[in-house]
Image: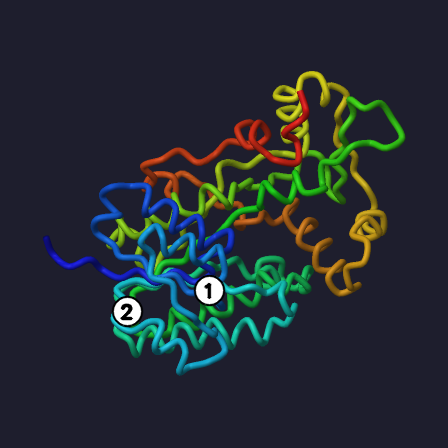
């Protein structure tokens, strides 16, 4: 049997990276073709140890250290790279981290860099929404990678379904127990590309790896479908027929939306508002279709109804 190709996965114990590892190990073909090396801050932690028991090589990696990354990427065939803007909320730091990963990948001879990217909202909206930093910073890294001599694909995660179950669709404290309310500062027809990051990141990234030649230089839009706010609530009611039967969508003001974010810094509240607001007129993916990205999948992405049925916050709802 030929030697396995090393695939380095950043954020191995996180949502995106963990999903990549799960999907590759769960497919006999890719489990045989690829050897996984998970990058984590502390390989001694329980989550990392659990990966080691599954045959994953877990190594310590610091995205701020060239020396650390050189060790982590040694001998790698492919790299799945994701950074965490929300840890420091510093776009310049995220850009430095992403560019460093890219530079080290080039030096290491990596044959396929998969960057977890997003659109540049400032450019997409001609400057109308210039505060969605966690999109723009990742887009800037993508732009940089495209100038380098490295084969690359750009994985573009959609709007996390877990954001909706994590508080956006919430019980109405002033009404019946059967009423949940989706409160967003956008019209009910706004198209939102929903994505189950925990289960489906791996489906898309595995497909990127196995369809390498088809997707080099391309963006892969990782979302199940575009759902309007109304559809999100309607399908929630269909699954939770008893406890969700009176649920509805309510468009709220910019200020009401920000107030509901609680103790988040004002800068973060502004960013979250713009993150929602730009989708109505400009589209999360610039109004691009999902068909080409779905064509490479060998597993169907999770539908919103399927997510509602399994989401832990709603496990007790009927």
Residue that badge 1 annotates: 44
**Which of these two is toward me, 97 or 282?**
97
Label 1 crowd (10 A; few <14 / some 14-19 / many >=20): some
For this view, does 3 lie left or right of residue 262?
left
Label 2 crowd (10 A; few <14 / some 14-19 / many >=20): many
Residue at the bottom extreme?
67
Q: Quadrant of residue 186?
A: top right
Measured along the vertical axis of the image, is residue 315 above or below residue 115? above
Residue 258 image offset from top left, x and y in percent: 80, 53
Closer to the chain start, of discs 1 and 2, is: 1
**Which of these two is toward me, 26 or 82?**
26
Q: Quadrant of residue 184?
A: top right
**Which of these two is toward me, 57 or 30?**
57
Residue that badge 2 annotates: 110
Q: What element carries label 2?
A: loop
For this view, does 90 lie left or right of residue 95?
right
Q: Quadrant of residue 317?
A: top right
Residue at image x 45%, y 52%? 18
Q: Distance between the residues labelled 1 and 2?
A: 27 Å
**Which of these two is toward me, 267 or 206?**
206
Q: Which one is closest to the eye, mark 1 or mark 2? A: 1
Residue 220 image offset from top left, x and y in percent: 40, 50
Residue at the right extreme?
174
């Amino acid at each position: 049997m030929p030697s396995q190709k090393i695939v380095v996965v950043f954020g191995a114990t996180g949502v995106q990276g963990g999903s990549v590892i799960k999907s590759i190990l769960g497919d006999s073909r890719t489990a045989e073709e690829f050897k996984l090396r998970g990058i984590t801050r502390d390989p001694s932690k329980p989550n990392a140890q659990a990966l080691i028991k599954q045959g994953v090589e877990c190594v310590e990696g610091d995205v701020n250290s060239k020396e650390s990354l050189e060790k982590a990427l040694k001998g790698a065939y492919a790299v799945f790279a994701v950074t965490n803007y929300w840890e420091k909320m510093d776009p310049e730091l995220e850009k430095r981290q992403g560019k460093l990963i890219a530079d080290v990948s080039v030096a290491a001879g990596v044959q396929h860099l998969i960057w977890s990217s997003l659109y540049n909202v400032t450019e997409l909206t001609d400057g109308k929404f210039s505060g969605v930093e966690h999109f723009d910073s990742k887009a800037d890294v993508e732009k940089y990678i495209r100038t380098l001599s490295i084969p690359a694909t750009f994985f573009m995660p959609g709007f996390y379904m877990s954001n909706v179950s994590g508080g956006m669709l919430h019980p109405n404290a002033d009404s019946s127990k059967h009423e949940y309310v989706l409160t967003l500062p956008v019209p009910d027809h706004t198209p939102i590309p929903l994505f189950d990051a925990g289960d489906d990141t791996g489906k898309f990234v595995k497909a990127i790896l196995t369809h390498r030649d088809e997707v080099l230089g391309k963006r892969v839009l990782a979302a199940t479908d575009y759902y309007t706010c109304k559809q999100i609530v309607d399908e929630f009611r269909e699954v939770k027929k008893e406890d969700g039967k009176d649920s509805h969508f309510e468009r709220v003001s910019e200020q009401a939306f920000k107030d509901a974010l609680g103790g988040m810094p004002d800068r973060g509240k502004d960013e979250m508002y713009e993150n929602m607001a730009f989708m109505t007129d400009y589209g999360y993916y610039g109004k691009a279709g999902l068909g080409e990205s779905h064509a490479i999948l060998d597993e169907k992405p999770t539908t919103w109804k399927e997510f509602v049925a399994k989401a832990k916050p709603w496990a007790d709802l009927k």
